[in-house]
Image (cartoon, grey):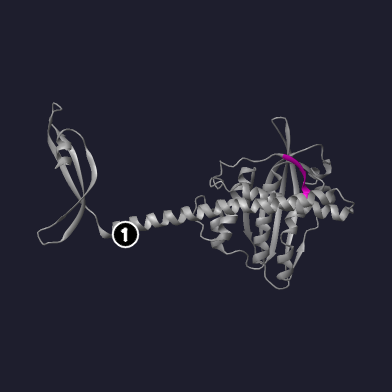
Amino acid sequence: MIMLYQGISGRDAEKFPFSFFDRKGKFVEVYIVANRRTAADGNIIGCFCFLQVIVPAMQEATEEHKQEDKELFTKLKHLVYMRQEMKNPLNGIRFTHKLLETTAISENQKQFLETSDACERQITAIIEDIDFRSDDEGSMELSMEEFVLGNVLDAVVSQVMILLKERNLQLFHETPKEIKALSLYGDRIRLQLVLSDFLLNMVHHAPSPDGWVEIKISPGLKLLRDGNEFLRLQFRMTHPGKGLPSTLIQEMLESGNSWTTQEGLGLNMSRKLLNRMNGHVQYVREHNKCYFLIDLEIKTKGRQKASLVEQH
């Protein structure tokens, strides 16, 4: 009654829970809504009342939604905890590497340390990106630094070597020295992350045993824009056989969040990251082989050999 009087006095009330027994003795739960009723001159002359029966299924759905929210919050807390705990041993590894760099080591050992350091930085970048917004294409901030393409390639290849051995696959990646020596400027670690994810999927889905995976890199035209020089690079990652499942490629290309597998999520995120870095990817199927074709436009640092672009 109080709510009805409030409606008559001009105060609207929405979804007030109310329960009663109907004529058949059945207990009914409803939401009652009261809205004021006005005349043409604006004076209040009464109120409209509406009853919305609460369907049991609706209550169950609400309870399920609350339970899902609770479980999601619990997982979120665990994720935050894991993020922090992963940083601690990673910092220890990085400190040890810094100490090793000050000791007398060979050139090969130095290269191994550089590759290991690049992989550690990739892990750090992944951890730092767990801010629950980084899957948004426009929210992630890219880092800019000078790097040598060959160092990125070494780090990428190192991440698939164990899997290649386990699956008895060969890797062909003869890259000319002049291409590996290219000095570029951009987000090295995220480029490394993207390339390693695409390559890992190629290795996972190559026919085994006695299959193979091939990496080829082709430099393209140089472009001048806003006083800066950019170089077009094309990465081709090939393997024989039927290739990746069509559903997985579809998940990679989806613009929303409709992926259902971990692989699909990874490929989708890598494609979005690549787009942010002025690149794009396509998956091509041919008669007896399939390949990722990755095109990237990246800023150069210093003068490169003209012969690289004159060949294309």
Task: Please name whichever residue, 117 or 199, is drawn nearer the observer in this view of the structure.
Answer: 117
| Above/below status of 6 relative to 133 | above
Residue at the (72%, 30%) spot, across then down: 227
Horizontal side, residue 46 vs residue 96: left or right: left
Which three-letter amino acid code belongs to the residue tagged 1? Glu
Q: Is residue 186 magenta?
A: no
| Above/below status of 181 relative to 241 | above
How many marks the image carries: the answer is 1
Which residue of the protein is positioned furthest toward the top in this rendering? 41
Task: Please name whichever residue, 160 or 254, is drawn nearer the observer in this view of the structure.
Answer: 160
**Where's residue 226, x and y in %?**
69, 30
Residue at the (75%, 54%) spot, across then down: 155
Horizontal side, residue 197 vs residue 50: left or right: right
The residue that mark 1 highlights is 60
For the N terminus, give its image quadrant. Answer: top left
Task: Please name whichever residue, 202 or 159, is drawn nearer the observer in this view of the structure.
Answer: 159
**Where's residue 34, x and y in %?**
18, 41
**Where's residue 228, x and y in %?**
73, 33
Within 10 Å of disc 1 (Cα), the crowding (few <14, some 14-19, many 20+) is few
Magenta highlight range: 145-151
Task: Please name whichever residue, 87 or 60, is drawn nearer the observer in this view of the structure.
Answer: 87
